[in-house]
Amino acid sequence: MKFGKNSLVLLLCLLLGATAFANGRKEASSASSGEWKPARPVSIVVFAGAGGATDLSARGLGKAFEEYFGVPFSVVNMTGGAGGVAANYVWNQKHDGYTLFGCSSGVHSLNVVGAFDVTNDKWDYLMSMGTPGVLSVPEDSPYKSIQDLINAGKSKKLKSSGSSAGSVWDLKVSQLEKVSGLEINHMPYEGSQPSMVAALSHEVDFTLTGLAEQREYILAGKLKPLAVIEKEPVKMEGFGEIPAISGLYPDFNKLPAPKVWVGVGIPGDTPQNIKDAYQKAFTVAMKSDLMKKLSNDTKFDLLGIQGKEAADLTKELDSVYSWALYDLGAAKKSPSDFGIAKP
């Protein structure tokens, strides 16, 4: 077949157009040549142990960021000090985009429990996922319902595991104490995974962690959920409905409802072009098949909160978490010392 001059020009234009279209699609899902991107591996330092919600989220985001930026993102679990060890470590590194803070809504209690003095308005948070809190007992526990557990707690001091002191799960145990009138022995563990293992090994009477974190144990019949420590019941696929503690104690509805999130933090004084690049990467990550699969597999709810929305929510949750802990007598310092207003 012979082509005339005009036909060849038209063919060339079509080929160039197809190439530009393909490149355009690639640019939409990876860092463009004009924006900042890391030139070497990046560390995500997680303030909780491996296997929990914070860890899983950090690993999911790390993989998504690897696809976007084209460099390795490694997760380092750095537990201790109720999360303060990792927070201090990240804060004391160069604020150059190469060290991110793998964290959760537990950051809203770090100041008042004396773990970390830098306030949350000095961080930019990328909130990826969330999950309700569920109280569960081991499969062979004598407690068949939340009422059974409460009744037992009237004659003996129950032991609970709810991650580290001051975490959202620890706070929810304190809220259970408030509405039930029980006195519970809070046993601190460095993350949700060891907290659940503590229940399975009968070190504690019950564990209170995220439903998404407990899902596999529940479906395997190793943990038995008695109630979600939330205002509304939750339906779990493959299990059924888990009642809300508010059904037993309506006064729970009067308590603050701390939103639970997991994600990563970036020091707020990091150069703006670096923060902009991470915000774009985060937007792409939250729409990726990788994060959708993680959400589906773990039953986390995708949030995708960042920027002003994250800053506003951070301010609100700082108030909710810190004053709730202070009012429950679980805080070492007053929220007012950090300029945190009452809710």
Image (tube, grey):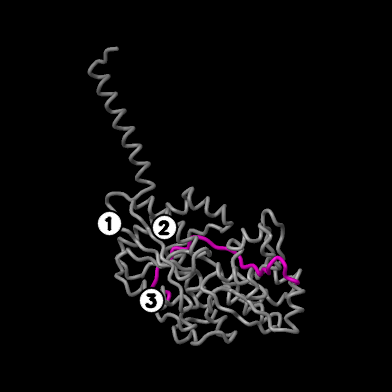
How busy is the neighbourhood of tag 1: few (under 14 within 10 Å), some, or many (20 plus)?
few
Query: On screen, 191 above or below 335?
Result: above
Q: Earlier in the sequence, mark 1 or mark 3?
A: 1
Q: Which residue is mark 2?
A: 62
Label 2's element? helix
Q: CA distance from mark 1 to mark 2?
A: 15 Å
Given the current orientation, which residue lies at the most extreme left position?
A: 5
Query: Is residue 233 found left or right of 44 in the rendered image?
Result: right
Q: Residue 50: x and y, percent?
A: 49, 65
Label 1's element? loop
Name which residue lies at 38% across and 53% down.
66
Name which residue lies at 58% across and 85% down.
327
Say if residue 282 shows up in the picture.
Answer: yes
**Which amino acid, mark 3?**
Asn
Q: Which residue is mark 3?
A: 88
- Residue 16 sits in quarter: top left
- Residue 169 sits in quarter: bottom right
Residue 205: which disc?
Answer: none
How busy is the neighbourhood of tag 3: few (under 14 within 10 Å), some, or many (20 plus)?
some
Q: Which residue is mark 1?
A: 39
**Which amino acid, mark 2?**
Gly
Q: Earlier in the sequence, mark 3 or mark 2?
A: 2
Query: On screen, 161 above or below 29?
Result: below
Q: CA distance from mark 1 to mark 3?
A: 24 Å
**Near-viewer residue (79 or 294):** 79
Name which residue lies at 31% across and 34% down.
19
**Which amino acid, mark 1?**
Ala
Q: Earlier in the sequence, mark 1 or mark 2?
A: 1
Read off the magenta span: 120-142
